[in-house]
Amino acid sequence: MKLVIAVVQDKDGNKLRDALIAQNFRATKLASTGGFLRSGNTTFLIGVEDHRLDQVLDLIKINCRAREQLMTPVVPLDGSSEPASAYPVPVQVGGATVFVVDILRFEQY
Ligand code: 2BA
């Protein structure tokens, strides 16, 4: 059995949740925050049998897409940086960042 941890954009979260439920996968959806952009994203915990792993990964790939997001850099107030660095810059955010880990033991009580 595997645990799939998938960080996706909020905009894709409900679509992915519905697709997982429709194909009878169990998942937990968590509200998370990206360390770099410091804005909200969504993290899924999906416990899955080994033989269905590729099916989950395909669902994530199909339902989540990369987008560009604007980020305003933090500018020190002491005037030590160029004024231009205060303008928003585009950052490419991936459709999904996925970790697959082995589950040693799975219990439900
Ligand atoms: P954030 O940390 O908010 O990062 C958003 C996007 O900003 C990243 O997209 C990447 O394109 C860019 N970025 C991140 N760190 C950067 C840096 N030091 N310098 C320049 N650009 C940087 P993704 O790579 O697609 O990541 C989307 C979200 O997935 C991340 O949001 C984070 O929440 C999660 N994530 C990505 N890699 C991770 C990792 N190795 N471990 C844990 N979470 C991760």
Image (cartoon, rainbow, N blue to C red):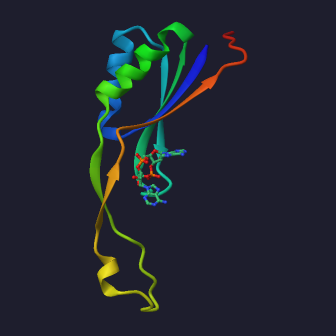
Percent of width and height locating residue 34: 47, 50
Circle count? 0
Picture quadrant of residue 71: bottom left
Residue at position x 44%, y 87% from top? 77
Residue at position x 48%, y 20% from top? 27
Q: Tell whether 11 sits left or right of 6.
A: left
Picture quadrant of residue 19: top left
Picture quadrant of residue 101: top right
Q: Is residue 84 above or below residue 91?
A: below
Residue farthest along the bottom direction in this orientation: 79
Quarter of the picture containing the C terminus is top right
Residue at position x 28%, y 75% from top? 87
Percent of width and height locating residue 102: 65, 21
Q: Tell whether 38 sits left or right of 72.
A: right
Residue farthest along the right direction in this orientation: 104
Query: Can you see residue 69?
Result: yes
Q: Is residue 14 above or below residue 9?
A: above
Residue closest to the eye, 46 or 59 = 59
Query: Can you see residue 49?
Result: no
Residue closest to the eye, 15 or 92 = 92
Percent of width and height locating residue 5: 53, 30
Quarter of the picture containing the N terminus is top right
Percent of width and height locating residue 2: 59, 18
Q: Is residue 84 above or below residue 61?
A: below
Residue closest to the eye, 77 or 88 = 88
